[in-house]
């Protein structure tokens, strides 16, 4: 299958997504293309990390880190807040995710922790246990949804009357999860369920009915799970701000605001409720900085439609806990508050302009009517801020002129009805779905058609179906204040910006124009890594988008840069300098050609954009347009722009170029480059092309580019595969040797056993013989004694003498046999001892050999398993490293294009001409041509109304000729006086009719008769 892009490190999830100051936590990251990621990069120096190391095994060459697991430490002095975290590896510096440093105690969930129902108690070893994890309030839980319909349970002890909030943070920390939370009593009765809170995250608000144990059930609303489905759930008697009114004040002021929320310090009951829960109110003074214009300080989620706003955040602290922030914006005119009774079209609230109305679409189906007085040709900018204040509001604006008929009855004539603002300049947006800045807020430049009264209707489709006091708005009616803001967004498929050596990447630049400002905006960037360059670009008049093209040199070293983008424009004759804001898509997306009707993806403002240069990898293809010089033509002109393509051998693919950021009303066709190395394409400018300076580039898109993914890792994994194979072979040999040794030791043990048996038998026989001979010796000794005693008593008895000799002989023989038997028994005993020792040694050797055999066989089995894993990993990486087709962005460099109004200039023409009645006067017009325009120019003149008696013929400046002469004739009755003649020079340039108008002051002098 064709891959969507070249590998770029993409970080989907960080778990846990936060820690307390002074704490260390084990963090696991998930994502795509995280090859060789060896570090986390935080936006605060006080947050550090080390890699978690695995236990060393015989298959490792020294200690090895665990992939994607880090030990993160937050220094004690790091202030609570949201910080960026990225990871860095072979495929660059990833997109950011949010890592929160919290002032509340942190808790990390562990699985398993419950099923679908309230977990029951289990008796185990005399101890009651419950799968729901025990927590103490206040606390922030770090959890995630992984594996099947994951449901997490927690339990806490609560007090009667305690107001407990569960603030679920998902969208605010870039999670994909849509958190649902429910609180139960221990008996399973639901106490509260989550509703929509700030940034469409979940908020659960309950007042506990009694002392006791409460259970919290947490899961994704659709039971979705996977990478990036993480949550932080802060629980306790938290201060929480729902909205502030009025939502704006003038810069430099210190006005009173009413904060509406829950658990407010010193808060008083208000008349408002949300989802049946009462809101408190608190009156505070908040200074609005005098230099707030152009600045936005807000730590919660800001979507693309809000990115052009200015403002500050406000928080409160209660119970030692800091609340969520609310946004307060700078007003553009004096603030007045909506009257309570302005829902009657026949009694609208009278406004004195300029002003800003602070109002709300509350209660349900509320509509607001206003009126104002205007003089003919008065110009006022109407700007509604509602959707941009952060709520899902869809306001509509109606302006009507009030007049009377001949009966004196009021007549209401619609001037404008505006709901969603139409999208401008859609023909060259290149999708732009990665940061959809469109808003539902109406904006209109009003010009009074006559003196008199006008009335205004504001209504909202959301309030038509629900009653919500958070549906507030600002209606600004001011003299036009042209201004602009700019947001820069990575143009690839993730927020990650990686430049391969010699290659390019793009940063989209979106302009938020205010009150009809249409001037050119110059955009430049610094903070680039060494070896990376970008040219200043210009967002031309009528365009809301431009593109910074970042280019890396062939020898650019690996490095990281933090982009600092500055914008400049001339507004009301003075240069205005504004630092750009930065945005990013939160999910990957595919490239789409201009005008593609594709859904927008979630995105937000971020603190910074960072760019990384690849350590070794070169860009497979590089597209270059132009010759390095600016181009210039006029309306009707045709620019032929050359291109060249440098390709790494074998990269191939079919390259298409999509023109981007060209002037409105330009004929810019798709460029089918294919496999060409060079060629050219055209831009054709129409008669209605808006003149100005523009930065233009080709969004090259290669379909089927041939690319090897991480062949270095494939080679590395192959070497490891070979090393593990050798270890396995050695293990097999060792096991075989151990088997042989064990068999030998068994044989030797058996032989020792046989020898011991023989020795035991021999000793037994020798002992028996020694006993027998000893008994015989004793008997012979007794007989010898008897005969000796008998002969002593009868010395002369010959028979006794013979018997004594026989007895002596028998004794001697018995003694000899006994002595020999004793010696044999002693020798047999010694041999038995030796046989026992040998048998014991043989037994020990056999046992050791069997243990060694078991160890060798187990290691062989481990080596086989490791070899299987190494084979699988090596095959996978080799498969990935095989040449495969990728669809790849190949952006060109930028070209500056200047479009002027006409391909001809009037070099000489009289400013005025005086003719007497009845006479003639000559007019000479000299022109110069440029941009290869050679055609004829027709000259026609228009007299003002009411002037007669003057004849001005049409004239023609022939092709390639520089001038024309013609006569103006004043008849005797020609109207006397000064007349402003409109001289029209009409030309056709490449089929486009262009008309240049120049004034000629014609004075007809009266001739007295």
Image: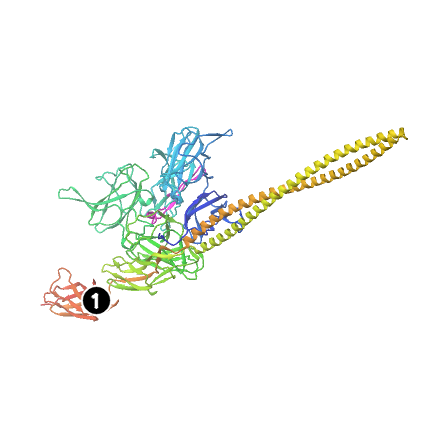
User: Does dot 1 land on a helix, a strand or a loop?
Assistant: loop
Q: Position of residue 615 (x, y in %)?
A: 45, 57
Q: Is residue 546 left or right of residue 880?
A: left
Q: Is residue 96 visible?
A: no
- Residue nearest the observer in this picture, 454 or 430: 430
Q: Is residue 542 visible?
A: yes
Q: Position of residue 89 (x, y in %)?
A: 45, 52
Whether 74 is drawn above or below 768: the answer is below
Whether 647 is drawn above or below 273: the answer is below
Whether 962 is drawn above or below 812: the answer is below
Q: What residue is shown at x 27% (from left), y 54% (from top)?
A: 427
Within-10-Å neighbours for mark 1: few <14, some 14–19, many 20+: few
- Residue nearest the observer in this picture, 730 or 247: 730
- Residue nearest the observer in this picture, 386 or 380: 386
Q: What residue would you read off at disc 1?
A: 911
Residue 557 lies within the magenta run: no
Q: Is residue 531 left or right of residue 629?
A: right
| Image quarter of residue 766 | top right
Q: Position of residue 556 (x, y in %)?
A: 43, 60
- Residue nearest the observer in this picture, 841 or 540: 841
Q: Which residues are magenta?
A: 302-326
- Residue projecting furthest to the left: 1009
Q: Is residue 764 left or right of residue 253?
A: right
- Residue projecting furthest to the right: 796
Residue 323 lies within the magenta run: yes
């Amino acid at each position: 299958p064709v891959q969507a892009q070249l590998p770029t490190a993409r970080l989907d999830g960080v778990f846990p997504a936060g820690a307390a100051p002074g704490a260390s936590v084990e963090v696991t990251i998930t994502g795509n293309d995280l090859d060789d990621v060896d570090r986390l990069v935080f936006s605060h120096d006080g947050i550090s990390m080390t890699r978690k190391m695995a236990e060393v095994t015989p298959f490792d060459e020294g200690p090895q880190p665990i992939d994607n697991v880090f030990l993160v430490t937050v220094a004690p002095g790091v202030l609570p807040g949201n910080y960026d975290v990225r990871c860095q590896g072979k495929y660059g510096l990833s997109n950011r995710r949010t890592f929160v440093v919290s002032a509340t105690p942190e808790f990390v969930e562990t699985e398993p922790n419950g099923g679908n129902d309230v977990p029951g108690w289990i008796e185990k070893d005399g101890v009651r246990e419950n799968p729901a994890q025990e927590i103490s309030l206040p606390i922030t839980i770090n959890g995630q949804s992984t594996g099947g319909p994951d449901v997490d349970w927690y339990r806490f002890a609560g007090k009667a009357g305690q107001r407990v909030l569960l603030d679920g943070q998902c969208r605010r920390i870039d999670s994909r999860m849509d958190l649902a939370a429910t609180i139960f009593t221990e008996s399973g009765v639901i106490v509260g369920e989550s509703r929509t809170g700030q940034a469409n995250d979940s908020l659960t608000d309950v007042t506990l009915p009694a002392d006791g144990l409460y259970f919290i059930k947490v899961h994704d609303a659709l039971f979705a799970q996977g990478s990036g489905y993480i949550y932080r759930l802060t629980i306790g008697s938290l201060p929480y701000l729902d909205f502030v009114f009025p939502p704006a004040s003038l810069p430099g002021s210190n006005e009173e605001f009413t904060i509406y929320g829950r658990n407010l310090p010193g808060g008083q009951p208000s008349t408002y409720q949300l989802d049946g829960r009462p809101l408190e109110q608190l009156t505070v003074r908040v200074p609005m900085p005098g230099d707030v214009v152009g600045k936005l300080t807000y730590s919660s989620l800001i979507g693309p439609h809000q990115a052009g706003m200015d403002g500050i955040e406000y928080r409160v602290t209660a119970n030692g806990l800091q609340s969520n922030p609310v946004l307060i914006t700078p007003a553009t005119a004096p603030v007045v508050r909506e009257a309570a009774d302005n829902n009657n079209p026949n009694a609208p609230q009278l406004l004195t302009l300029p002003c800003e109305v602070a109002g709300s679409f509350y209660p349900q189906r509320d509509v607001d009517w206003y009126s104002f007085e205007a003089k003919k040709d008065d110009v006022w900018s109407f700007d509604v801020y509602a959707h941009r204040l952060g709520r899902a509001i869809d306001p509509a604006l109606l302006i009507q002129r009030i007049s009377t008929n001949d009966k004196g009855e009021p007549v209401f004539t619609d001037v404008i009805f505006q709901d969603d603002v139409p999208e401008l300049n859609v023909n060259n947006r290149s999708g732009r779905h990665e940061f959809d800045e469109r808003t539902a807020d109406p904006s209109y430049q009003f010009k009074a058609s006559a003196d008199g009264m006008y009335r205004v209707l504001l209504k909202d489709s959301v309030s038509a179906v629900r009653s919500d006091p958070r549906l507030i708005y600002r209606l600004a009616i001011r003299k036009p204040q042209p201004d602009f803001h700019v947001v820069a967004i990575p143009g690839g498929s993730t927020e990650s910006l990686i430049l391969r050596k010699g290659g390019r990447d793009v940063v989209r630049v979106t302009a938020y124009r205010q009150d009809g400002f249409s001037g050119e905006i110059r955009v430049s960037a610094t903070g680039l890594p060494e070896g990376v360059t970008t040219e200043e670009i210009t967002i031309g008049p009528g365009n809301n988008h431009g593109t910074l093209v970042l280019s890396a040199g062939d020898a650019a070293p690996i490095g990281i840069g933090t982009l600092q983008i500055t914008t400049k424009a001339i507004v009301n004759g003075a240069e205005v300098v504004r630092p750009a804001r930065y945005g990013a898509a939160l999910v990957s997306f595919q490239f789409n050609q201009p005008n593609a009707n594709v859904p927008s993806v979630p995105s937000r403002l971020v603190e910074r954009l960072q760019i990384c240069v690849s350590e070794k990898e070169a860009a497979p293809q590089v597209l270059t347009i132009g010759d390095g010089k600016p181009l210039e033509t006029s309306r009707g002109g045709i620019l032929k722009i050359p291109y060249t393509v440098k390709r790494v051998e074998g990269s191939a693919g079919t390259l298409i170029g999509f023109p981007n950021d060209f002037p409105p009303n330009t004929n810019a066709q798709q460029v089918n480059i294919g496999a060409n190395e060079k060629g050219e394409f055209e831009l054709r400018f129409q008669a209605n092309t808006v003149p100005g300076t523009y930065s233009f580039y080709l969004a090259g898109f290669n379909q089927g580019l041939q690319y090897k993914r991480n062949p270095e890792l494939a080679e590395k994994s192959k070497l490891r595969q070979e090393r593990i194979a050798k270890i396995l072979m050695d293990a097999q040999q060792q096991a075989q040797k151990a088997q042989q040794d064990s068999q030998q030791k068994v044989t030797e043990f058996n032989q020792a056993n046989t020898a011991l048996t023989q020795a035991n038998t021999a000793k037994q026989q020798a002992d028996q013989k020694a006993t027998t001979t000893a008994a015989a010796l004793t008997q012979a000794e007794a007989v010898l004694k008897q005969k000796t005693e008998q002969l002593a008593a009868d010395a002369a008895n010959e028979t006794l003498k013979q018997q004594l000799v026989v007895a002596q002989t028998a004794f001697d023989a018995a003694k000899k046999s006994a002595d020999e038997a004793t010696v044999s028994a002693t020798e047999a005993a010694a041999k038995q001892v030796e046989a026992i020792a040998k048998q014991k040694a043989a037994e020990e050797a056999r046992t050791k050999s069997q243990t060694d055999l078991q160890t060798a066989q187990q290691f062989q089995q481990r080596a086989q398993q490791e070899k299987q894993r190494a084979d699988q990993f090596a095959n996978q990486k080799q498969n990935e490293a095989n040449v495969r087709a990728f669809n790849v962005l190949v952006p060109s460099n930028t070209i500056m294009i200047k479009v002027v109004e006409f391909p001809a200039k009037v070099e000489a023409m009289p400013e005025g001409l005086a003719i007497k009645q009845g006479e003639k006067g000559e007019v000479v017009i000299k022109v110069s041509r440029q941009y290869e325009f050679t055609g004829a120019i027709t000259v026609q003149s228009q007299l003002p109304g009411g002037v007669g008696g003057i004849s001005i013929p049409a004239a023609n400046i022939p092709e390639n000729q520089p001038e024309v002469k013609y006569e103006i004739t004043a008849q005797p009755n020609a109207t006397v006086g000064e007349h402003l003649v409109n001289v029209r020079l009409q030309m056709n340039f490449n089929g486009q009719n262009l008309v240049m108008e120049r004034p000629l002051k014609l004075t007809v002098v009266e001739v007295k008769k």
